[in-house]
Image (cartoon, rainbow, N blue to C red):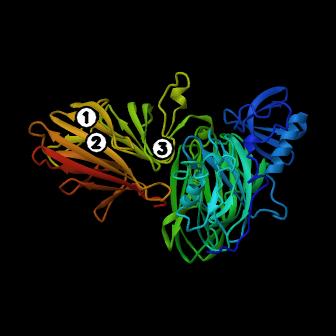
Amino acid sequence: MRIPTSFYLSLFALAAPLWCLADTSGHGAHAAMGSGRLAWMVDGDTVNASIRAVDEGVLTLLLEDGEQKRVPVARLGEAERKRVAHWKMVNRAPEGFGEADRTLRLVTLQGQMRYSEEEVKVRPGQKVQLILHNVDDMHHNLLLCTPDSEDGMEVAQAAWKLGGDGFERQWIPDHPKVLFASRMADPHSTIHGYFTAPEETGIYPYVCTLPGHAAFMKGKLVVEDTPTDLSELTFTLYRGAFDQLPDFERLTPEATDHVPSGLIDLSVTDRKENFALVFEGILNVPEDGEYRFLLASDDGSQLWLDEEKVIDNDGVHGVERKRARKLLTKGPHAIRVSYFEKSGGEELMVRWSGPGFEKGKALSAEPKRRGDQQMRGIPLASQNGEARLYRNFIDGAGNRAIGVGYPGGINVSFDADQMRLAQVWLGGFMDAARHWRGRGQGHQPPLGYGVLPCPEGAPLAALATPEASWPTPEGRSPGFQFKGYTLVGKQRLPVFRYQMGTVAIEDAIAPEGALLGSDIALNRTLTLRAEADPPEPLYFRAALAEKIDPVDGEFLVDASVVITLEGGEDPLLRKQGDRWELLQPILFHEGTATVKQRFAYLLGQTD
């Protein structure tokens, strides 16, 4: 297949790798071979930092603790100014490239073997500037491949065959299916690359081709000719300790610019508290009809369409979701999303759905509730295809919690006091900084998003009648005893073991699919073996939520997760107070019973 497009490598893309360039500073530019983090003399103090950006005479440094420091280049010493000049030279656009139509910013997630964005969209023929922030402790690169390259694995395998020449070649193979190749990014460094998007629409995979990385570190560039949902998107930043959204007309903005990601995205600012943002642009409506909108934020936010307030989610609060419906005509509509953050966590999520895309699409970047933890904390993740365990205090799972990060991007926490699956979530696993640095106190929350809380209390109970109330949760489930866990298979998946009277239970949980493929799920199998007559009738409590809808034999929980049950008899859905409860009757046969539970996320569902 011939792709009529032009691709450019920035200078030095195939020359000597950055990690072995000569020291041009005269003061030991590379304190450690292969690291982009160097010693800088700033205002009389020495700091270890890497270059994040250089813009209009101002250098932005990324410090070891994740903080950023802006320094006028004119205030640097001669050696540091030479270093900045060299960085600008190797990261400049090729001659004749001109201004980029689109800037793509990708971050390597520390310790997670992933890019921050696993799907990006561009228009055919757009000139693209790629900015790759490598905050990881390993080298990484990015190669864009043809659609017929087996998700980039064909190219990655060719790179791995370079063997001892790999680093010298920056793990870039001479392969016809390579469309663009960034140079190799040192740990804790930022590199730029430039290319023109293909003229042919389609899905173009990108991968990191260092040995073993491509199986996890991958994404797809979607080239589509249809207008993007959002266009002409800008942001305006304000500073202030707000308790509600202010009258922005009375304030002086601190900064304003186009949004590089093309989405409503909190990463346009490094501030974590006492700020406000206004995003303005065009929402391109594909056809006449009713559209549904979801606005979730911590703290306050509002959504406006054509100068009409559609959703009001104002005020100081944790993550709260508001929904609305609106009839819209085909064509462009003015959209404005205003947001403020006072203190604590920060999150802003906007989604919409309508005719032709009922499952919904994101208008905002993927939520990053603890946005800078990848750089500041100690993020844990599944590695080498094996599950990662974390035993400590976990928010929502108690003092005897066991966290499990599975391959594919799904995670759970297990409460060993109550013998229950406590939570399921997507994305990042856990940040160990609170407990691993010194004597950190308190409970660590999940690092990812889409947290589904599971029922508190004992997972199994004998009920006299189907209408009988479930036992009230206690600190430790009475009549239960935790027996530990065993690790099974190549993925080293934990199987939890516990006892309920004379009944021994094995609780096995296994991942299915992958977050990148939007088919992520979790399969749970409880195997019960009774040494004597088991208690009857015995029930398993599968879910407890404000909203549980039965759909074709499955159950939609809080409009976001589908639960499927198998256990012999039909599941029982009943109202308990202001919430719904999903129970599975358990049938024993010759002293053994099995219950299967499947969790499948509806990625993109808005209501």
- Element type at marker 3? loop
Q: Amino acid at mark 3?
A: Asn
Q: Residue at x 68, y 61 (%)?
A: 180
* Residue 131 falls left or right of residue 531: right
Which quadrant would residue 146 be assigned to in this image?
bottom right
- Element type at marker 2? strand
Q: CA distance from mark 3 to mark 2?
A: 24 Å
Return the residue found at the far front: 164
User: Which residue bears the numbered disc 1?
Assistant: 498
Q: Amino acid at mark 1?
A: Tyr
Pointer 3 local density, CA inside 10 Å: few below 14, some 14–19, many at least 20:
some
> Does the CB distance between marks 3 and 1 fall below 8 Å?
no
User: Which residue bears the numbered disc 3?
Assistant: 384
Pointer 2 local density, CA inside 10 Å: few below 14, some 14–19, many at least 20:
many
Q: Nearer the N terminus, badge 3 or badge 2?
A: 3
Which quadrant would residue 569 be assigned to in this image?
bottom left
- Element type at marker 1? strand
Relative to the observer, which residue lies in front, 519 or 287?
519
Q: Nearer the N terminus, badge 1 or badge 2?
A: 1
User: Which residue bears the numbered disc 2?
Assistant: 507
Q: Nearer the N terminus, badge 3 or badge 1?
A: 3
Q: Residue 224 in the image: state x and y as whole percent.
A: 62, 71
Q: Residue 562 in the image: state x and y as whole percent.
A: 36, 57
Nearer the camera: disc 3 or disc 1: 3
> Does the CB distance between marks 1 and 2 fall below 8 Å?
yes
Q: CA distance from mark 3 to mark 1?
A: 29 Å
